[in-house]
Image (cartoon, rainbow, N blue to C red):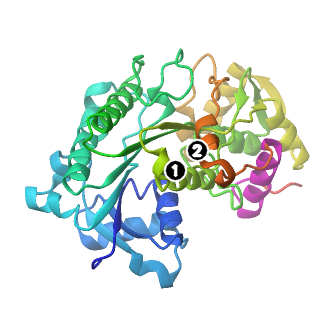
Amino acid sequence: MGDRSVTLVTGATGFLGSALVVSLVEQGEAVRCVVRGATAASRAAKLRTALDGRVAAKDQHRIEVVPGDLAEERLGLSAAGFAALGRDVSRVVHCGARVNMTLPYGPLYGTNVRATEELIELAEACSASFGYVSSLAAVGRSVTGEPFELHDSVSGGYGQTKWSADRLVSVAHQEGRVRAVILRPGRITAHSRTARSNPDDLLERVIRVSAWLGVVPVLDTRVRLSPVDWVSRLVVALFGTERAHGQAYHLIAAQSLLWADVPAALRAAGYEPVELPYQRWRSAVLAAGRDDPAVARLCHALPADRLSFDDRIGCEPRNAARTLAGEYPDLPPAAGLLGGTIAAWQRTGELPSVP
């Protein structure tokens, strides 16, 4: 990419990572994307699929695709190849991770922890700033505020690996090895305008399956919609703000909805879902999953006794609002976001047409 300053991005083929690439390119950045794949052609195709036409042809030259597998030591590269990743790099945005809520710490360690440590070393070697996309899963339930360094441990293999990597980043900054920003998203939901969604997101899959089956669960939970475009704008804005370094940011919408607002929004869109207690609704989904592979994918993610989508009632993005001040991107009202997403899903065929 010549003598231009480059932003190195991991996780570029993921739901948030691809949105970050789009946001960076729109700002005129040169982006080097680390993508797993056996050949250059397969890596380019994988990124092209993830970007899904969101980068204009005139801006394609800003994107470079390089090989790398976070699960392998040094990303599966030789020492020279790994060092070459840092050529002309002034910023590293580490968004890649293996997200699995059922595996223990060990199988997730290489991808989520060791790779983070290696990328910190790369950023230190090329004097690049380091933006780490952590997770609210790394934050203990008793933690208040948005501390830069986490001390309270968490449960679950995924949360523990994100906690460990989060600590590596905060300590590296405090030791003066890198200038770091830690960004901790919660649930990331569909794009606020296009409703382009993560097909693996549990909340949105529950809503869509409920519309298709005509039954919706009765749940004691709240719902937060943190659209991917809003989260990606926050990440890019905070990482590009010098005063943000040495701070952590919880990227989750301040406003939440009652779960009861979900069936209400489906009715407003023309559906007539029958409300069932959760266990009965789950049984209906399991029965449908025996004949429908798409529904079967949801079945495996449904807990037997209780379903919750927001158990961080006091969590708000206060630090981001303070740091960005007038540049802080506002969100539409949550009810409007939900209704707009359902309407967009109807237009794209992700929800059934209304009789």
Residue 144 position, x and y percent, is: 56, 20
Q: Earlier in the sequence, mark 1 or mark 2?
A: 1
Residue at 39 percent across and 17 percent down: it is 153
Drawn side of residue 65 relative to residue 135, left or right: left
Q: Is residue 319 magenta?
A: no
Q: Quadrant of the C terminus?
A: bottom right
Q: Which residues are magenta?
A: 334-351
Residue 323 numbered tag: 2
Q: Residue at x 26, y 71 (%)?
A: 40
Residue type, mark 1 in image:
Leu
Give the residue at mark 1: 238
Please tell me in which quadrant of the rendered image residue 251 appears.
Answer: top right
Residue 146 position, x and y percent, is 53, 29
Contact between marks 1 and 2 (CB within 8 A): the answer is yes
Q: What type is the residue that disc 2 sits on? A: Thr
Residue 14 location (% of width, % of height): 45, 53
Residue 38: quadrant of the picture: bottom left
Is the residue 109 above or below the residue 348 in the image? above
- Above-or-below relation of 204 to 221: below
Left or right: 20 as drawn, with respect to 286? left
In the figure, 183 relative to 346: above or below?
above
Q: Which mark is residue 260?
A: none
The kind of secondary structure the magenta stretch mainly shows is: helix
User: Badge 2 local density, few (<14 within 10 Å), some, or many (20+)?
Assistant: some
Of 19 and 221, the residue lying toward us: 19
Residue 291 in view? no
Q: Secondary structure at mark 2?
A: helix
Query: Which residue, as the protein is rendered here, is positioned at the far bottom?
Result: 58
Question: How far separated are the C-alphas under marks 1 and 2?
Answer: 8 Å
- Label 1 crowd (10 A; few <14 / some 14-19 / many >=20): many
